[in-house]
Image (cartoon, rainbow, N blue to C red):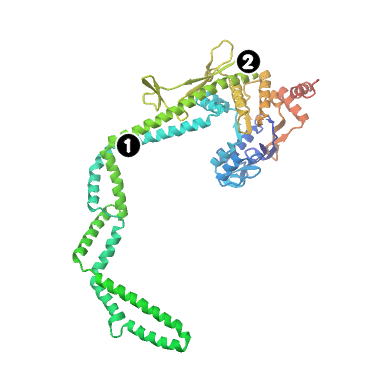
Amino acid sequence: MLRHLQIRDYALIEDLEVSFDSGLNILTGETGAGKSIIVEALKMILGERASTEVVRTGARKAIIEGAFDEADVPKMNSLLEGHAIEPMPQLILRREITSSQSRGFINDTPATLAVMREVAAQMIDLHGQHEHQSLLRTETHLELLDAFGGLGGLLATYQDHFHAVAKRMEEREKLVARERELHQQKELFAFQIEEIDRVKPQEDEEEALEAERRILENAEHLYQATASVYESLYESDTAINDQLVVARNELQDLARIDATFETALEEIKSAQIVVAEIATFLQDYNARIEFNPERLEAIRHRLTKLDGLKRKYGGTLEAVRAHREEIGATYKLATDFEGAIKRLDLEIQARQQELSKAAQRLSAKRREVAERIEQAIGGELARLGMPHSRFEVRFNHQSQPDGWIRFATGRSEERYAAFANGMDMAEFFLSTNLGEAPKSLVKVASGGEVSRIMLALKTILAKSDRLPILVFDEIDVGISGAVARKVGESMHDLAHYHQIIAITHLPQIAALGDVHFVVEKVVEGNRTKSKIRRLTDTERAEQVAALMSGTEVTEAALESARELMGVGRKP
């Protein structure tokens, strides 16, 4: 629940703090006192975009901060951790707005507006005084139906198949668009493929050829140098090996006299072994040296060809090979364009079959849900003063010759348009008078009726809704009298399941609040400010009486207010 809200330097608000309770929290106040400003400020910490003009004149920045209890739950913690935000027992959302920028924070960690919206969407539903007009847009009816039926899982499955078909259709469109281009490039690619394949560059070939070329070009030097070093080590009159033998013999004599020469003796023996191994290596290498000008010329010729390919196709043999692979695939496509289209069409057809099954499952479930929602809303509307109302959900599909949704009907096949949210188009119909046939809700409902229908929807949705906080900003527009009382009772019942914050101008609703706040506009130091204060029971009665009779509160109005609140009633 929203435990505490603080607003500083936002529009007319200099410094406002309010602590809400569970149940039904009522906010009242004169027009222009600042009730809507509080709601707008609340929207800021819910991630809505801010205008820099909201900063109070003379202030450096506006700050809005909300503290939410009961947010330390696994789903919320997982969401926060996914955005590198440390979960805390109390969730703190803060927004700071200056004349040049806006910043958001969650638990003192900077957060984008998108993340703030994502977090807020787990806790709060703000329903403004104009939002009930969404009922007058038929595109929202299916969303409300799915929400009531909890069809998010089926819808997500359908959408996975929808996006899979859309992706393949896009691939097909791109492939068809490339047909002329591919035809034009076909001859060029054929020439390049033939040119590269004629040389057939191999992986790591260039390094090996360069190494072999260096050896062949320096064969004479290698032959002479290895022979010279071998002679110095083993065959000359002053061969190193012979000198080591003399030194070894001397050390052996010395070691017999003094054991400390043993280490030196072992070292010189090791030196003899190393010299012998080097001499053997040099002798073998010298014997294998090849004087092959024909092979050298062939290597040079091969390297020249590889250099030619490198200059034309990317600068390295890796780039040449990558280019060959790329144009090879494109050339294959160009020579088998019809086959590629056919294979893609078969995949699209298979994907559409899966899409059609998912669409059918979702559509059938929606019809089941529609029956339940019709009964539930009918019952709620009766409670809200519309006893003879009749509410219906009607479905329609859009036939389309090339539609993605396919249904077999006997030997023929029906095809329908696929939309991002299914194959269905849904619309709410309403009859408010006995004996009248239901008509489109967008054509027949008055403002007060739309408000009651939306409240009925909120009521039946909220009992199974995961959102703990509901905010109603004067959705009671267009109703009064006994109907207003029924609306208030419905909101009071709804407050058993959720914390509700309701801005109202109706005494029948205000009287049923668990807590009552009044928003007032005052002038201090030649500046207008909005303030909020929590009312005592006595002040609540006075405020309800003021809503009933205007600025002059009479004793009769007070008595009526107490009766409306259920205070002082006789048993």
Mark 1 or mark 2, earlier in chain: 1
Seen in the picture, residue 172 relative to 258 is either above or below; the reply is above
Q: Going by the image, does 416 lie left or right of 368?
A: left
Seen in the picture, residue 212 relative to 412 is either above or below; the reply is below
Q: Position of residue 302 (x, y in %)?
A: 23, 58
**Residue 208 shows up from this direction:** yes
The crowding category of the residue bearing disc 1, from other C-alpha atoms within 10 Å (few below 14, some 14 to 19, many at least 20), is some
- What mark, if any, has residue 387 been given in the picture? 2
- What mark, if any, has residue 175 been given in the picture? 1
Residue at the bottom extreme of this rendering: 257
- Residue at the image point whose x is 57% and y is 21% from the top: 372
Q: Position of residue 457 (x, y in %)?
A: 59, 24
- What's under tag 2, amino acid-wise? Pro
Q: Position of residue 180 (x, y in %)?
A: 27, 37
Q: Going by the image, does 252 lie left or right of 537?
A: left
Q: Going by the image, does 532 lie left or right of 419?
A: right
- What's under tag 1, amino acid-wise? Leu
- What mark, if any, has residue 210 been given in the picture? none
Which corner quadrant of the image does residue 287 belong to? bottom left
Element assignment for label 2: loop
Which corner quadrant of the image does residue 42 belong to? top right
Looking at the image, which is closer to me, 197 or 33? 197
